[in-house]
Amino acid sequence: MRSKKLLPAPSPPECGVVVPLGPRRGADGSVGAQLESLFREHQRDLLRFLRIRLGSEADASDALQIVFTRLLQRADSLQDDNLVSLLYVSARNVAIDLIRERRHAGVDDFARIETNELPDEQPGPDRHAQGQQRLKLLMSLVNELPRRCRGAFISYKIEHMEYADIARRMGVTESMVRKYVIKAVAYCAARLERMEGWE
Amino acid sequence: MNYPTARDEKAAYWYLRLRDADVTPEEIQEGLRWQRQCLENQAAFDRVEAYWRAWSSVSDERAMLDQIGFERSWSTRKHWLAAAAALALASIAAWFFLSWSSHNAPRSIEYTTMVGQVRTITLQDGSEVVIGGATSIRTSFSSNKREVFLTEGEALFRVKKNAARPFVVASAEGLARAVGTAFDVHRGPEGTTVTVVDGLVDVRPPDGPEDRSAHLHPGDQVSLALGGKLDQTRHVNADEVTSWRTGRKVFIDESLVSVVADLNRYSAKPIALAATDVAGVRITGTVKVDGIRAWLQALGPLAGVNITENEHSIVLAGSPPKR
């Protein structure tokens, strides 16, 4: 059961508008009230960020709840000049903690994605076959990549290696490895979208 | 159509950066701002996210690695190169298999010669290849690249100049890249050797950094050992190296195992090495491919190799001369 009663109501979306957000006094001027108002302003972005990190909407709101609770508990000791940064750092750290917990439990990054988020995925015996087909497709895209790009991507995505370790192994700089992985992801993502009717 | 676009790459950059453990709060905000800045950014970013999520249903990593022939337990550079070579092979195979139906389909054509046969062919782009005996090459040409894979044997390439479509010859040990030039690629049991006749060629292991390629000028030769280790560049007589085209094989300080492998690509009767203790004997000499048997008979006493012949093959055995 996910409770959201601690969270303030979300602010309306500001499409395409960049709002400069400095720290700001809440109604009563306390850090707690400031936090609440900042949460309202940044909720959408924080959720988006957490969803990128954790994979699912549900995990993202759980994580945001933790961020809010943690910060509120420390409200008295917080400086009010850097609350926005603190908000994002906390979100990042909570996400890292959750991912670590999952890894300990032997669960993959996205294991908690609800099946209804993947419309082509059905329960039952077909599921395994579909997974196999999808694996084949994804690997075929990886195999289209130039050699170094592919090597870097496989080490990063499949072997879960750190950029620095991949760099040492490949004999290139860490920034080169990052470039390879970026290229790999950009290529495969664009390619995947163009392959209609994939399983 | 060329993709990914700069926007796709930016989207991938931000997606990956946002997932890094050391991403700063400023970067998080900047990344999020970028992805909702306009519809195009949003679409590119969502695409990257969808791709990343597509992996979630296939968490069987062992199966993934198996599928691309990837050796997981390697830790040394040699193993890395071997794995890279395996990947290179797997990928080229996959490339041929996959892309024949796509719009930018490289056409894959395989050319194979029989033992003793030397053929000259003209490739789709006008480049000319002289293929030696028992040699197999596959070409894969697309609008921006010309790739040739040499499985085994030797071939001399005369490349039609086209800077926009680099000409790359790949073997399991490495890549030779040329724009407009003539060069010889030889693959035998001990690795791949590239010799430049004309122009400039860059040679590197499949996964070696480009900036550490060997830059070969006319007359230069370099070898890549099995696994892809790049040797010192040396100067040779390119005419001699490519004389196989006219029915002569020139060996300069080569191991007997390499010589035998080479001669077997021209000899009507298979040559067999019966003892491993002679495999390493070094051979220097010139063989006419229509006089292999006579040459071996002469070689025997000089190299301390015992030559016998039966119905099926010429057998080399015995001990190398004591020094």
Image (cartoon, coloured by chain):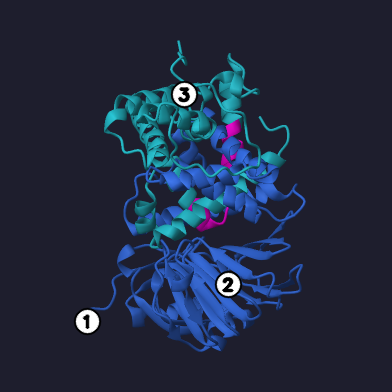
Chain colours: A cyan, B blue
Q: Chain of mark 1?
A: B
Q: Residue at x 59, y 38 (%)?
A: B51
Q: Which mark is residue B323?
A: 1
Q: Is residue B251 above or below residue B93?
A: below
Measuring 69% from the left and 69% from the top, which residue is drawn there? Answer: B165
- Disc 2: which chain? B
Q: Quadrant of residue A129?
A: top right
- Residue B45: x %, y % from top left: 60, 42
Location of residue B131 with respect to B38 vertically, above or below: below
Residue that sits furthest to the left in the current view: B323
Amino acid bearing label 3: Asp
Is residue A111 visible to the viewer in this orientation of the structure?
no
Please name whichever residue, B88 or B264, is drawn nearer the observer in this view of the structure.
B88
Q: Residue A59 shows which numbered tag?
A: 3
Considering the image in quadrants, where does the N terminus of chain B appear?
bottom right
- Quarter location, residue B124: bottom right
Whole-percent x and y of residue B232? 39, 79
Of the residues tagged 1 and 3, which is closer to the observer?
A: 3
Q: Secondary structure at mark 3?
A: helix
**Front position in the image: B59 or B99:** B59
